[in-house]
Image (cartoon, grey):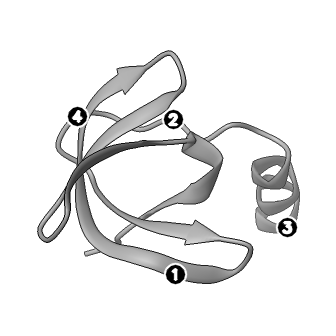
Amino acid sequence: MSILLFLKSLFSTPQFGPGERVNHVRRGIIERTDGYIVAPMSGGMLVEWPRGGSSIIPAAELTVILQ
């Protein structure tokens, strides 16, 4: 069952909520770390980074930081 859930996750757009901690991963390389989702935007998610201010990142390029 977990294999099916994993395969399904590869083809779905990730859903994030305000306050979630994320990393920005582009083409398998971590571009930025320790960001916080501020709000969903039309072009992606508005993310506040500890260094570098905020930016809008496509949801597909974000990964949740598991605690």
Side of 16 where 35 appears, left or right = left
User: Residue 31, image x and y in percent?
Assistant: 48, 76
Q: Residue at x 19, y 64 (%)?
A: 52
- How crowded is the residue under tag 2: few (<14 C-alpha within 10 Å), some, or many (20+)? few
Mark 1 or mark 2: name the one nearer the start of the chain: 2
Q: Are marks 1 and 4 in contact (CB under 8 Å)?
A: no
Mark 3 or mark 1: name the one nearer the start of the chain: 3
SS for callout 3: helix
Callout 3, which amino acid? Answer: Ile
Mark 3 or mark 4: name the one nearer the start of the chain: 3
The residue indicated by pointer 4 is 18
Residue 3 is labelled as 3
Residue 15 is labelled as 2
How far is mark 2 from mark 4, CA to CA? 10 Å
- How crowded is the residue under tag 4: few (<14 C-alpha within 10 Å), some, or many (20+)? few
Mark 2 or mark 3: name the one nearer the start of the chain: 3
How far is mark 1 from mark 4, CA to CA? 21 Å
Q: Are marks 1 and 2 in contact (CB under 8 Å)?
A: no
Q: Which residue is drawn at 25% across and 75% down?
A: 67
Side of 11 where 30 appears, left or right = left
Q: In which quarter of the image is the N terminus?
A: bottom right
SS for callout 4: loop
Q: Which is more foreground, mark 1 or mark 4?
A: 1
The single residue placed furthest to the top in the displayed view is: 42
